[in-house]
Image (cartoon, grey):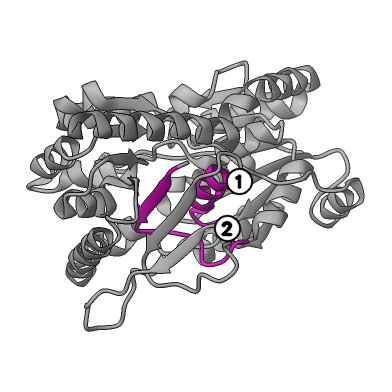
Amino acid sequence: MARILFLTSSYPSSPEDGVCGFIDDLARTLVESHGHSVRVLAPPGDFTGFEPVEVRAVGHPWPFARRLLAGVDLGATVRGSRAGQSEAVSLTLALAGAAFMSRSWADVTISHWLTPSALAASLAGIRPHVAVAHGGDVHLLAGLPAGRQLARFVVVNADRIVCVSDDLGRRLVSLAPAAASKLDVIPMGARLGPEPNPPEVRAFRDSHSTDGYTRVLFLGRLQPIKGVDVLIEAASRVPGIDLWIAGDGPEHARLIEQAQAARLRVSFLGRIDRRERRVALAACDVVAIPSRIEQNGRMEGTPVVCAESYVSGRPVIATRTGGLVDAVEDGKTGLLVPPDDAEALAHALRRFSTDPELGRRLAEGARAVAPRFDMATTAAAFDTIVADVIEANRSTRG
């Protein structure tokens, strides 16, 4: 069994926090199901209760009020902010130093997000090294003046590269062609825990829905790239829809005003923990993922909520962006629509709400692909990669 070092710029603030919970889920599954030891190096946070995973906070010498903490969206924090960008450099160097200090402990390092984590591992000269691209990191590198050079530096200094979707893999290879020979595509799976009990689910439905209405759930951070404003506009055009919006973020107040102006029945659930996510997924009929492509070309990789939906047996209505094009089989596991098209999204919602047979067929499709998107499958793939890179490193040394 291996000692695995995780480097990450984001991590849940508590075991029940859903923000970047997939990183903790992967670490926990590698420990519990595969017998590895995992140590995580992450920005400052309160990391109590994460056993059997060992989580260590990495302090960095940024002298002002820190914004890059464990549960923070690094991309959103640094975008357009010189102070945020300077702090990101400070965090990268601190992660590199902490990784270097842990090199004698670790058999292999897995870095989540190419920047700053994989860049930090590369600067520290850590090998063997598996770099994982999640989406925003590749876009960030594509937009930096020296981004192509940084991407190639990371790729050269990694033994394997993992991308969460085929689309993301193609975008990374366009930046760093050498990635093609090291690339694995592994969806970041979901680990949801036990099924909620039926009375709990009924109570949730009774509190947030109307009898006979179609229950549509959005789960995610309320920021422009998520396209929740388009979802609200679309839902306002379709009668018989109960919209549940779970999450928090900078768009929260504006979205409430939009829903009120549209006289739409919307339940804003706020930031919910993992257990509440499980209940909401069990209680809804369909999950909406209305991600958009921003003007600067930024798009998401594959939102983990897609995996969570399938593992819960729920189909999705999603936009044709990023990894969603690969993850959603149109007409089989969900419905795909163009991004930023409220009328097309409304048409998909209308089809789903008025055609019970379509809903049943899509739900069956979601359940059929669920094993592919389960964290157990993701962890097994990483377990194989870990064994391969450790063996290859030993052979090279020998």
* Residue 193 relative to residue 149: left or right: right
Percent position of residue 259, x then y: 61, 56
Q: Nearer the viewer, residue 232 or 305?
A: 305
Please report the residue visible at 88 percent of the width from the left and 54 percent of the height from the top: 203
Query: Camera-side residue: 103 or 130?
Result: 103
In this view, 308 is above or below 64: above
Q: For the residue carrying disc 2, how many other residues have a C-alpha within 10 Å: few (<14), some (14-19), or many (20+)?
A: some
Q: Earlier in the sequence, mark 2 or mark 1?
A: 1
- Is residue 119 depicted above or below 326 in this figure? below
Q: Residues within 10 Å of mark 1 (few under 14, many from 20)?
A: few
The amino acid marked with disc number 1 is Glu
Is 339 left, or right, of 305 in this rendering? left
Indicate yes or no whether the magenta region holds residue 16: yes
User: Which residue bears the numbered disc 1?
Assistant: 32
* Residue 148 or residue 103, whichever sits in front: 103
* SS class, disc 2: loop
Q: What amino acid type should be assigned to the residue bearing mark 2? A: Pro
| Quarter of the image where one finds residue 35 | top right
Can you name the residue that lies furthest to the front here? 398
Whole-percent x, y for residue 346 in the image? 59, 33
| Magenta region, residue range | 2-31
Image quadrant in which you'd find residue 282: top right
Quickly name the residue at label 2: 52
Residue 214, position as x, y percentages in the image: 76, 37
Label 2 with label 1: CB-CB less than 8 Å: yes
